[in-house]
Amino acid sequence: MRYSGFRILKEALTGHKGWRPVWRSPEPKPQYDIVIVGGGGHGLATAYYLASKFGQARVAVIEKGWIGGGNVGRNTTIIRSNYLLDGNEPFYEFSLKLWEGLEQDLNYNAMVSQRGILNLIHTDAQRDAYTRRGNAMLLQGADEQYLSTDQIRREYPVLNFNDARFPLKGGLAQRRGGTVRHDAVAWGYARGADLRGVDIIQNCEVTGFRIENGICRGVETSRGFIGAGKVGVAVAGSSSRVMAQAGLRLPIESHVLQAFVSEGLKPVMPGVITFGAGHFYCSQSDKGGLVFGGDLDGYNSYAQRGNLPVVEDVAEGAMALIPGLGRVRLLRMWAGVMDMSMDGSPIIDRTPVEGLYFNGGWCYGGFKATPASGWCFAHLLATDTPHPTATAYRLDRFRKGLMIDEKGMGAQPNLH
Ligand SMILES: Cc1cc2nc3c(=O)[nH]c(=O)nc-3n(C[C@H](O)[C@H](O)[C@H](O)COP(=O)(O)OP(=O)(O)OC[C@H]3O[C@@H](n4cnc5c(N)ncnc54)[C@H](O)[C@@H]3O)c2cc1C
């Protein structure tokens, strides 16, 4: 349905009885050209671009729960393109450009807010590393700016500049980075896809793949078999479990990541900051709550809840940077399951099973990738060739030694 000022007025005067669901709830058809498994941000964006940019009409998204119930509705909403490596930076910059035009494209308010992101620097070696990163960003056409301690003091007086355990020595800023309302992204893509004829089928779990002579013919689901010319899987934290149903073992581990929101405060945090001497990052929502997070819970898990050691670790990072936070009350916390790849970078590729395609390994940075991931996966599904910005995201790169290891951590998924 369409929204307008007139519509709001009319509904207000007639008891709000005319609002309709934003997308249909169709019965699954027996056969589609393309079936997307997973109705998170990436699955919905893929379906939207398949229909809107690649002229694919017979597309379905199969979601075991409800739209927005996975990581797309659980993340801390940060978008940025401050990557170092050639395999990553053009892709994330493409994504940031898509974010910049997303609301006009979808005709939906996703609260895209380019309030800026600032990576704080605490050592001279870190300054060298961030200078190198900033140069790599400039070479790929992204924006970056080095901020001195005085500039940071003017913009973020809430940070600790006096007797800090880890003194602030500057920062790498990306002014075009920022935040986006995460669940509105899912709803906007769902609405846009539905308007173009995509069937979004919720409460329908994929339980297997029908593979005949090495070719994927469709998916077995809790609501019966659904035939498909091609199947694209985008199930984030469930990647290993779902792809195992096709007999594939992925270079991915699942780990829990927690997030936290404080009570509402007056504006203290104009953009997003990341601590450079521990794992802590923070922004302030439009309602006033500080939204923050830190490290993964270190163990493998599919539980969408975390444990206390990481809560303590995040609180330590927060207190080292903003001691005043110690007096702020925590309002809520939650967790999501992350598909951590061996080199910390994603996969958008065909699989050894013909007609079966995979999108995953987003680690804890997949929200910012949503538009480009959807576009590139749609490109691959529609044309059978990788999008130019996603050519490095191949499944066989681990076998060939072509890792895209942003952090230089090696094959240690919980450290990426
Ligand atoms: C606490 C937290 C903070 C984060 N912060 C950020 C951030 O600030 N910036 C950033 O860029 N990224 C962030 N991320 C990461 C980001 O949220 C994810 O990488 C991204 O959302 C994953 O893609 P998705 O939206 O498609 O996943 P999801 O929304 O999880 O979608 C996958 C869907 O697949 C469905 N599914 C699973 N199995 C099946 C099945 N068998 N059949 C049918 N459907 C199935 C699930 O129900 C789910 O809805 C964060 C994540 C968390 C948890």
Image (tube, grey):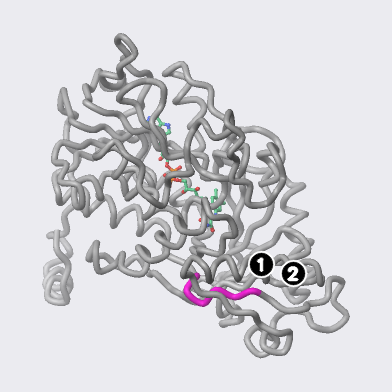
Task: Name the kind of residue labelled 1 in the image.
Answer: Arg
**Total marks drawn?**
2
Q: Nearer the viewer, residue 260 or 282?
A: 282
Image point (56%, 80%), residue name: 270
Q: Specify the quadrant of the image occupied by residue 363.
A: top right
Identify the residue position indicated by label 1 in the image. Answer: 132
Q: Specify the quadrant of the image occupied by residue 182.
A: bottom left
Q: Is residue 190 above or below residue 99?
A: above
Identify the disc placed on residue 154.
Answer: none
Q: CA distance from mark 1 to mark 2?
A: 6 Å
Identify the residue position indicated by label 2 in the image. Answer: 128
Quadrant (top left/top right/bottom left/bottom right) for the N terminus: bottom left
Residue 284 location (% of width, % of height): 55, 72
Image point (74%, 71%), residue name: 127
| Disc 2 residue crowd, few under 14, some 14–19, many 20+, Cα 10 Å | few
Whether disc 2's CB lies below 8 Å from ligand 1 is answered: no
Residue 115 location (% of width, % of height): 49, 77
Please report the bounds of the magenta region as a residue range.
172-177
Callout 1–callout 2 Cβ contact below 8 Å: yes
